[in-house]
Amino acid sequence: MRVLTLSLFTLALWISQAGVALAHLPDGKTYKVFQFPDSLLPAMDGDLGDWKIVPEKYWTSTADLMDTEKGNGTKVDEQDLALRTAVGWNKTRNRLYFAVEGYDDILNIERGLPPEGIWGGDIFEIVVDADHNGGIYNGFSAADSTLENRWRSAQAQNYHIFFPPESKDWTMWLWGKAQWACTPPFADVGWKYEGVHGGKGKVYQELWVTPFDDLNWAGPDSSVVHQLQEGEIIGVSWSFLDFDASDEEYDGFWNLSHNSRMDHTGDLLLDFVLEPVELAK
Ligand SMILES: [Ca+2]
Ligand SMILES: [Ca+2]
Ligand SMILES: [Ca+2]
Protein backbone atom coordinates (compact mmCIF):
# COMPACT_ATOMS: atom_id res chain seq x y z
CA MET A 1 0.00 0.00 0.00
CA ARG A 2 1.44 3.34 -1.01
CA VAL A 3 1.11 5.57 2.03
CA LEU A 4 2.99 8.72 2.97
CA THR A 5 2.16 11.16 5.73
CA LEU A 6 3.60 14.64 5.60
CA SER A 7 4.33 17.08 8.36
CA LEU A 8 2.99 20.60 8.66
CA PHE A 9 6.52 21.74 7.90
CA THR A 10 6.32 19.96 4.55
CA LEU A 11 2.98 21.61 3.91
CA ALA A 12 4.46 25.03 4.63
CA LEU A 13 7.29 24.24 2.25
CA TRP A 14 4.82 23.21 -0.41
CA ILE A 15 2.81 26.41 0.01
CA SER A 16 6.01 28.44 -0.32
CA GLN A 17 6.65 26.70 -3.65
CA ALA A 18 3.20 27.42 -5.06
CA GLY A 19 3.33 29.46 -8.22
CA VAL A 20 6.90 28.49 -9.04
CA ALA A 21 7.26 26.55 -12.29
CA LEU A 22 9.37 23.53 -11.40
CA ALA A 23 11.51 21.37 -13.64
CA HIS A 24 9.74 18.07 -14.01
CA LEU A 25 10.95 14.59 -14.87
CA PRO A 26 12.68 13.35 -16.86
CA ASP A 27 15.02 16.24 -17.51
CA GLY A 28 14.67 17.89 -20.89
CA LYS A 29 11.96 15.60 -22.24
CA THR A 30 8.53 16.85 -23.22
CA TYR A 31 5.44 15.09 -24.47
CA LYS A 32 2.81 16.42 -26.84
CA VAL A 33 -0.88 17.00 -26.17
CA PHE A 34 -2.91 16.76 -29.36
CA GLN A 35 -5.36 19.61 -30.01
CA PHE A 36 -8.77 18.32 -31.11
CA PRO A 37 -10.56 20.78 -33.42
CA ASP A 38 -14.13 21.53 -32.31
CA SER A 39 -15.52 19.55 -35.25
CA LEU A 40 -13.54 16.38 -34.47
CA LEU A 41 -14.01 15.81 -30.73
CA PRO A 42 -13.83 12.15 -29.73
CA ALA A 43 -17.01 10.45 -28.53
CA MET A 44 -16.63 8.59 -25.23
CA ASP A 45 -17.75 5.22 -26.57
CA GLY A 46 -14.60 3.07 -26.53
CA ASP A 47 -14.30 3.27 -30.32
CA LEU A 48 -10.85 4.82 -30.79
CA GLY A 49 -11.45 5.45 -34.48
CA ASP A 50 -11.86 9.14 -33.64
CA TRP A 51 -8.22 9.13 -32.41
CA LYS A 52 -6.85 8.14 -35.84
CA ILE A 53 -6.35 11.85 -36.55
CA VAL A 54 -3.69 11.92 -33.79
CA PRO A 55 -0.19 11.68 -35.35
CA GLU A 56 2.05 8.83 -34.24
CA LYS A 57 4.50 11.12 -32.40
CA TYR A 58 1.77 11.91 -29.86
CA TRP A 59 1.45 8.29 -28.75
CA THR A 60 3.44 6.61 -26.01
CA SER A 61 3.90 2.88 -25.54
CA THR A 62 4.69 0.39 -22.80
CA ALA A 63 8.38 1.01 -23.56
CA ASP A 64 7.99 4.48 -22.00
CA LEU A 65 6.89 2.97 -18.69
CA MET A 66 8.79 1.63 -15.69
CA ASP A 67 7.58 -0.66 -12.92
CA THR A 68 8.80 1.08 -9.79
CA GLU A 69 7.21 -1.23 -7.21
CA LYS A 70 7.68 -4.89 -8.19
CA GLY A 71 11.22 -5.00 -9.49
CA ASN A 72 10.51 -5.29 -13.20
CA GLY A 73 12.07 -1.92 -13.96
CA THR A 74 11.98 -1.23 -17.67
CA LYS A 75 11.90 -4.93 -18.55
CA VAL A 76 8.62 -4.85 -20.39
CA ASP A 77 7.00 -8.09 -21.50
CA GLU A 78 4.36 -7.13 -24.01
CA GLN A 79 2.85 -10.62 -23.64
CA ASP A 80 1.98 -9.48 -20.10
CA LEU A 81 0.96 -5.89 -20.75
CA ALA A 82 1.08 -3.68 -23.83
CA LEU A 83 -0.32 -0.15 -23.70
CA ARG A 84 -0.64 2.63 -26.24
CA THR A 85 -1.67 6.00 -24.83
CA ALA A 86 -2.30 9.51 -26.15
CA VAL A 87 -3.42 12.79 -24.58
CA GLY A 88 -5.55 15.45 -26.24
CA TRP A 89 -7.09 18.79 -25.43
CA ASN A 90 -9.75 21.12 -26.76
CA LYS A 91 -9.73 24.87 -26.31
CA THR A 92 -13.49 25.47 -26.55
CA ARG A 93 -14.57 22.69 -24.17
CA ASN A 94 -11.48 23.22 -21.99
CA ARG A 95 -11.00 19.49 -21.55
CA LEU A 96 -8.10 17.04 -21.39
CA TYR A 97 -8.71 13.78 -23.23
CA PHE A 98 -6.95 10.43 -22.76
CA ALA A 99 -7.02 7.33 -24.94
CA VAL A 100 -5.61 3.96 -23.93
CA GLU A 101 -5.47 0.86 -26.07
CA GLY A 102 -4.21 -2.05 -24.03
CA TYR A 103 -3.48 -5.76 -24.22
CA ASP A 104 -3.37 -7.66 -20.94
CA ASP A 105 -2.75 -11.39 -20.50
CA ILE A 106 -5.15 -11.53 -17.54
CA LEU A 107 -8.08 -9.13 -17.65
CA ASN A 108 -9.38 -8.22 -14.25
CA ILE A 109 -12.97 -7.22 -14.86
CA GLU A 110 -15.30 -8.80 -12.33
CA ARG A 111 -13.28 -8.36 -9.17
CA GLY A 112 -15.26 -6.71 -6.41
CA LEU A 113 -14.79 -3.34 -4.83
CA PRO A 114 -13.74 -2.98 -1.20
CA PRO A 115 -14.33 -4.68 1.16
CA GLU A 116 -14.70 -7.70 -1.16
CA GLY A 117 -11.52 -6.80 -3.01
CA ILE A 118 -8.91 -4.28 -1.96
CA TRP A 119 -8.46 -2.60 -5.31
CA GLY A 120 -11.23 -3.83 -7.56
CA GLY A 121 -9.34 -4.80 -10.70
CA ASP A 122 -6.83 -3.55 -13.26
CA ILE A 123 -6.49 0.21 -12.91
CA PHE A 124 -5.32 3.08 -15.09
CA GLU A 125 -4.26 5.98 -12.85
CA ILE A 126 -3.71 9.49 -14.20
CA VAL A 127 -2.50 12.68 -12.56
CA VAL A 128 -2.99 16.19 -13.95
CA ASP A 129 -1.30 19.34 -12.65
CA ALA A 130 -2.70 21.85 -15.12
CA ASP A 131 -0.97 25.01 -13.84
CA HIS A 132 2.31 23.10 -13.57
CA ASN A 133 3.19 24.47 -10.16
CA GLY A 134 4.12 21.08 -8.71
CA GLY A 135 4.07 20.42 -4.99
CA ILE A 136 2.39 17.89 -2.76
CA TYR A 137 -1.16 16.96 -3.64
CA ASN A 138 -1.70 13.86 -1.52
CA GLY A 139 -0.76 12.53 1.92
CA PHE A 140 -1.01 15.72 3.99
CA SER A 141 -2.05 14.29 7.32
CA ALA A 142 -3.63 11.07 8.50
CA ALA A 143 -4.52 12.82 11.76
CA ASP A 144 -6.10 16.00 10.40
CA SER A 145 -9.07 15.17 8.18
CA THR A 146 -9.88 18.84 7.57
CA LEU A 147 -6.42 19.41 6.11
CA GLU A 148 -6.51 16.19 4.13
CA ASN A 149 -10.01 16.74 2.77
CA ARG A 150 -9.28 20.26 1.62
CA TRP A 151 -5.97 19.63 -0.16
CA ARG A 152 -5.97 16.04 -1.40
CA SER A 153 -6.21 16.35 -5.23
CA ALA A 154 -6.77 20.12 -4.94
CA GLN A 155 -3.64 21.42 -6.71
CA ALA A 156 -3.26 18.35 -8.92
CA GLN A 157 -5.87 15.68 -9.50
CA ASN A 158 -5.27 11.93 -9.25
CA TYR A 159 -7.92 9.80 -10.98
CA HIS A 160 -8.25 6.03 -10.93
CA ILE A 161 -10.18 4.36 -13.73
CA PHE A 162 -10.94 0.65 -13.93
CA PHE A 163 -9.59 -0.98 -17.07
CA PRO A 164 -12.29 -1.62 -18.14
CA PRO A 165 -14.95 -0.39 -15.67
CA GLU A 166 -17.45 -3.06 -16.78
CA SER A 167 -19.61 -4.47 -13.97
CA LYS A 168 -18.61 -1.67 -11.59
CA ASP A 169 -20.98 0.69 -9.84
CA TRP A 170 -18.64 3.53 -10.65
CA THR A 171 -16.12 3.96 -13.40
CA MET A 172 -13.73 6.68 -12.31
CA TRP A 173 -12.81 7.94 -8.89
CA LEU A 174 -10.59 10.67 -7.62
CA TRP A 175 -8.32 10.60 -4.61
CA GLY A 176 -9.93 12.95 -2.13
CA LYS A 177 -13.52 13.90 -1.56
CA ALA A 178 -14.38 15.81 -4.75
CA GLN A 179 -16.07 12.87 -6.45
CA TRP A 180 -18.44 15.29 -8.19
CA ALA A 181 -15.52 16.06 -10.55
CA CYS A 182 -15.57 12.49 -11.96
CA THR A 183 -18.88 12.66 -13.81
CA PRO A 184 -20.48 14.93 -16.46
CA PRO A 185 -20.34 17.88 -16.88
CA PHE A 186 -16.80 17.65 -15.41
CA ALA A 187 -15.58 14.28 -16.74
CA ASP A 188 -16.68 11.25 -18.72
CA VAL A 189 -15.33 7.85 -19.74
CA GLY A 190 -16.14 5.24 -22.37
CA TRP A 191 -14.76 1.78 -23.11
CA LYS A 192 -14.98 -1.43 -25.10
CA TYR A 193 -13.14 -4.68 -24.58
CA GLU A 194 -12.52 -8.05 -26.16
CA GLY A 195 -12.05 -10.98 -23.80
CA VAL A 196 -13.36 -12.34 -20.51
CA HIS A 197 -12.46 -11.94 -16.87
CA GLY A 198 -9.35 -14.01 -16.09
CA GLY A 199 -8.34 -14.39 -19.73
CA LYS A 200 -6.28 -12.38 -22.14
CA GLY A 201 -7.85 -9.54 -24.02
CA LYS A 202 -7.79 -6.00 -25.33
CA VAL A 203 -9.32 -2.88 -23.81
CA TYR A 204 -10.11 0.37 -25.62
CA GLN A 205 -10.70 3.21 -23.22
CA GLU A 206 -11.12 6.96 -23.56
CA LEU A 207 -11.95 9.66 -21.06
CA TRP A 208 -11.84 13.36 -20.47
CA VAL A 209 -11.40 15.44 -17.36
CA THR A 210 -11.68 19.11 -16.47
CA PRO A 211 -8.37 20.69 -15.38
CA PHE A 212 -8.50 22.43 -12.01
CA ASP A 213 -6.06 24.90 -10.45
CA ASP A 214 -7.86 24.39 -7.16
CA LEU A 215 -10.34 21.57 -6.73
CA ASN A 216 -12.40 21.99 -3.58
CA TRP A 217 -14.56 19.07 -2.50
CA ALA A 218 -17.19 21.57 -1.34
CA GLY A 219 -18.23 21.96 -4.97
CA PRO A 220 -17.73 23.74 -8.31
CA ASP A 221 -18.48 27.19 -6.88
CA SER A 222 -15.58 26.82 -4.44
CA SER A 223 -13.17 25.50 -7.09
CA VAL A 224 -11.02 27.16 -9.75
CA VAL A 225 -10.99 25.68 -13.26
CA HIS A 226 -7.75 26.02 -15.23
CA GLN A 227 -8.12 27.60 -18.68
CA LEU A 228 -6.03 25.60 -21.13
CA GLN A 229 -3.89 27.70 -23.48
CA GLU A 230 -2.11 26.67 -26.67
CA GLY A 231 1.64 26.39 -26.10
CA GLU A 232 1.50 26.03 -22.32
CA ILE A 233 3.10 23.17 -20.41
CA ILE A 234 1.04 21.09 -18.03
CA GLY A 235 2.12 18.31 -15.68
CA VAL A 236 0.82 14.82 -16.43
CA SER A 237 1.70 11.25 -15.55
CA TRP A 238 -0.07 7.94 -15.50
CA SER A 239 0.45 4.46 -14.21
CA PHE A 240 -1.07 1.08 -14.84
CA LEU A 241 -1.71 -1.20 -11.89
CA ASP A 242 -1.71 -4.65 -13.48
CA PHE A 243 -3.42 -7.28 -11.34
CA ASP A 244 -2.82 -10.72 -12.84
CA ALA A 245 -1.92 -13.41 -10.31
CA SER A 246 -3.43 -11.92 -7.15
CA ASP A 247 -6.61 -10.14 -6.15
CA GLU A 248 -4.81 -8.10 -3.54
CA GLU A 249 -1.40 -7.29 -4.99
CA TYR A 250 -0.57 -5.89 -8.38
CA ASP A 251 2.15 -7.48 -10.52
CA GLY A 252 3.47 -4.12 -11.61
CA PHE A 253 3.08 -0.39 -11.06
CA TRP A 254 3.96 0.70 -14.58
CA ASN A 255 4.31 4.45 -14.66
CA LEU A 256 5.45 7.12 -17.08
CA SER A 257 7.13 9.15 -14.35
CA HIS A 258 9.51 6.31 -13.42
CA ASN A 259 8.86 7.24 -9.80
CA SER A 260 6.09 5.85 -7.59
CA ARG A 261 5.72 9.15 -5.78
CA MET A 262 3.99 10.62 -8.80
CA ASP A 263 1.06 9.63 -6.64
CA HIS A 264 1.97 12.30 -4.06
CA THR A 265 3.72 15.23 -5.69
CA GLY A 266 3.31 17.23 -8.87
CA ASP A 267 7.10 17.62 -8.95
CA LEU A 268 7.34 14.10 -10.40
CA LEU A 269 4.94 14.63 -13.27
CA LEU A 270 6.09 15.05 -16.85
CA ASP A 271 6.01 18.11 -19.07
CA PHE A 272 3.20 17.92 -21.65
CA VAL A 273 2.90 20.74 -24.22
CA LEU A 274 -0.54 21.81 -25.50
CA GLU A 275 0.10 21.74 -29.23
CA PRO A 276 -1.62 23.62 -32.08
CA VAL A 277 -3.95 21.66 -34.35
CA GLU A 278 -1.90 19.12 -36.31
CA LEU A 279 -3.82 16.28 -37.94
CA ALA A 280 -2.31 12.97 -38.98
CA LYS A 281 -1.84 12.71 -42.74
CA1 LIG B 1 -14.45 7.36 -29.36
CA1 LIG C 1 -0.78 -8.59 -17.27
CA1 LIG D 1 -4.23 -7.69 -15.46
Image (cartoon, grey):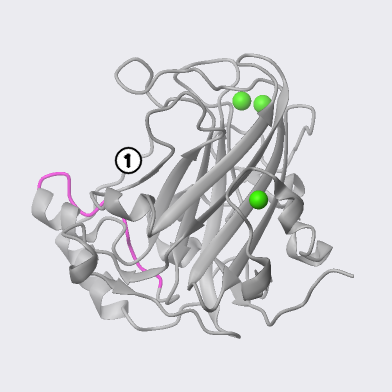
Mark 1: secondary structure: loop
- Quadrant in the picture for residue 15: bottom left
Q: Label 1: which residue? A: 3
The residue nearer to you, when weighing 281 against 70, is: 281
Q: x, y (%) of residue 169?
A: 37, 29
Indicate whether 228 appears above or below 1.
Answer: below
Q: x, y (%) of residue 109?
A: 54, 22
Q: Magenta: predominant secondary structure element? A: loop
Q: Residue at the front extreme? A: 39
Q: x, y (%) of residue 234?
A: 52, 73
Residue drawn at 42 percent across, 77 percent down: 131
Left/right placement of residue 113 relative to residue 209 reads left
Is residue 32 visible from the viewing direction of this image? no
Indicate whether 276 appears above or below 142.
Answer: below
So how many labels did they put on this image? 1
Left/right placement of residue 192 relative to residue 9 reads right
Left/right placement of residue 251 relative to residue 133 reads right
Residue drawn at 11 percent across, 48 percent down: 145
* Image region (quadrant) for ligand 2: top right
The residue nearer to you, when weighing 244 against 34, is: 34
Q: Quadrant of the N terminus?
A: top left
The amino acid sitting under disc 1 is Val
Residue drawn at 45 percent across, 72 percent down: 130
- Which residues are drawn in magenta? 134-143
- Quadrant in the picture for residue 51: bottom right
Left/right placement of residue 268 relative to residue 81 reads left
Mark 1 is surrounded, within 10 Å at the Cα level, by few (under 14), some (14 to 19) or many (20 or more) other residues, namely few
Q: x, y (%) of residue 232?
A: 55, 83
Indicate whether 40 appears above or below 149.
Answer: below
Is the residue indicated by label 1 positioned so its CB lies within 8 Å of ligand 3?
Answer: no
Whether residue 233 appears in magenta in the rendering, the answer is no
Indicate whether 209 appears above or below 118.
Answer: below
